[in-house]
Image (cartoon, rainbow, N blue to C red):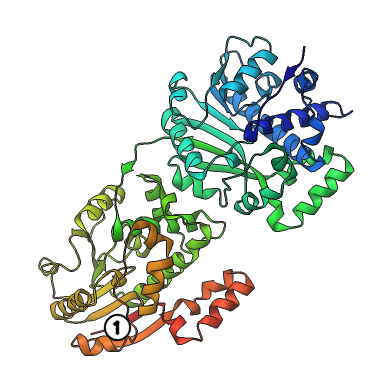
Amino acid sequence: MTEQIRFTGAQQTLLGPLYARALDNRRPDPVLGDETADRLLDRIDFDFRRLMSTGDRMAVILRAKQLDDWAAHYLAEHPDAVVLHLACGLDSRAFRLDVPADVHWYDIDMPDVIELRNRLYPQGPANYRTIAASVTERDWLDEIPTGRPTLVIAEGLTMYLTEADGVDLLRRLVERFEIGEMIFDSVLPWTVRAARFSGFLQRTGASFHWGIGDPHSLELRVPGLRLRQELPMMDLPTVAKMDATNRTIAKFMNAIPPLRKAMRLLHYSFEHQPREKVELTGAQATMLATLYLRALDNRSADPMLRDRHADEAVQRIDFDFGKFKLHAHNAGSVAMRAKALDRWVEEALRPGMTVLHLGCGLDSRFERIDPPESVEWYDIDQPDVIELRRRLFPERPHHHTIGSSVTATGLLDDIPGDRPVLVVAEGLTMYLSEVDGLALLRRITGHFPSGELIFDAFSSLGVRVSNRFNPAVVHAGARLHWGIDEPRALESNVPGLRFVTEWSFTDAPELDRYPRPVRAAIRASGRITAMRRMGRMLRYRF
């Protein structure tokens, strides 16, 4: 007796992998050897031939084999694990693998899929169960026991979810099961856009939604997640077992960088730990965006700033950094700015100085600079920011924190004014009004006998552009105000202040890391004064 199929959209895509696994089993030397898929094919009344191209079938077999290998290795090490097979479709993974008797295996998919699955598959062993639910629903997790190491498998799922649903699902899994591993396939963001030309998706009526660019970004959006391995599917050793046509396709894809990682497998471990709940808005929330980008830089293959403290802080914060719509390519400018300011601070720092780090946010500049013990360092920001900072960063001798607005008139009352001062401010001046900014500078020059001021500043044009197009500013609901067009103008507004130099990011030596066309465009823009002064660093003495 055959089963007639009435699936549409994303659900119909589960038939393609079944067909691919069955055809693989009919080869003389199969890669996967899925006899169950072969038998099921004869029981389903459906014209499979129109579903998948040769290349699509190859990708299905390669990813299934690698996920099987990862799962088998995990179960060998954890014979008492819980396995969640998300969007299982008609996959026979629970029966292909040698699953230990003490493992609890759960196949989860939509109710109509599970209904069909239960008709097609024989009664499973006592440690096997199906759950009929959408993986994006919340209640189904309550049916699964906790307290065991947990393996989460998702094949052909993530790209059909929205980004918000996908991240939310991963966060809920980590929070509930606390320790384990996740293995799944993903596509790049550009693949989502190109997928509308896929014959397979057109024939099924399905569509892609979520592409994962930098896999490290998930570590920072899902606290406790840690990337173990990223494998482009065309690099898998089982490619060698494919026929000559498919090997040629794989070789072609590997030769073109954007295609090489278009489809890849991601392997994460996870361990849930208590996090600091953070709810900041407006200008204060932008410090979280900056922290996130410094952490992303630290996770890159060749970090610019190497701020491990930012990385560790992000892991301890319960906040979805995805709301800022920032990606790995945004990290370069933030890391470049921080590194340039660090260089100037190291040049200007002298034993016996006082350092005021204004609007410090969650910046680990004190930890990166590691000043001599004779230096008294003050990190200053709003009280709720400083309270969070104290929970995230360990106390150190000669390191002080002050919870206050930098514009408060009594800010300097408790700071001795008998030493030279070094003032550093990153990402602060543009959020102040011009009146408040100038008043702050006058109070500093009036309180200390001498010193230097180092800070970044936007021009008026830079302020307008950032208010409209900077994702961290726009999505945080913040607003920039003060643009400094002519740096020498501050000399006449702040008695004793003397302009030393300015430095534009278009001059950064780190630009050599960028692709040649990007590097050339940025440096060319530096020859235009208006573009050069949109964002730069200023240095003063008094």
Q: Is residue 36 left or right of residue 245?
A: left
The x and y percentages for residue 31 are: 80, 31
Mark 1: which amino acid? Tyr
Q: Residue at x 34, y 84 (%)?
A: 485
Count of marks, rendered view: 1
Q: Is residue 384 left or right of residue 6?
A: left
Quadrant placement of the C terminus: bottom left
Using the rendered view, name the quadrant where residue 418 is placed: bottom left
How would you rate the neighbour count of disc 1 (Cα within 10 Å): few for under 14, some for 14-19, many for 20 or more?
many
Q: Is residue 149 left or right of residue 369?
A: right
Could one spot residue 240 in this view of the protein?
yes
Could one spot residue 338 in this view of the protein?
no
The answer to which of 375 and 442 lies nearer the viewer is 442
Image vertical order of residue 482 relative to residue 246, above or below: below
Using the rendered view, name the quadrant where residue 511 is placed: bottom right
Q: Residue at x 68, y 56 (%)?
A: 258
The answer to which of 245 and 369 lies nearer the viewer is 245
Image vertical order of residue 184 relative to residue 429, above or below: above
Element on which disc 1 rests: strand
The x and y percentages for residue 298 are: 48, 56
Q: Residue at x 68, y 25 (%)?
A: 6
Using the rendered view, name the quadrant where residue 47 is placed: top right
The answer to which of 97 and 59 lies nearer the viewer is 59
The answer to which of 76 and 203 lies nearer the viewer is 203
Image vertical order of residue 506 relative to residue 100, above or below: below
The x and y percentages for residue 323 are: 41, 51
Mark 1 lies on residue = 540
Quadrant placement of the N terminus: top right
Q: Is residue 339 left or right of residue 71?
A: left
The x and y percentages for residue 221 are: 45, 46
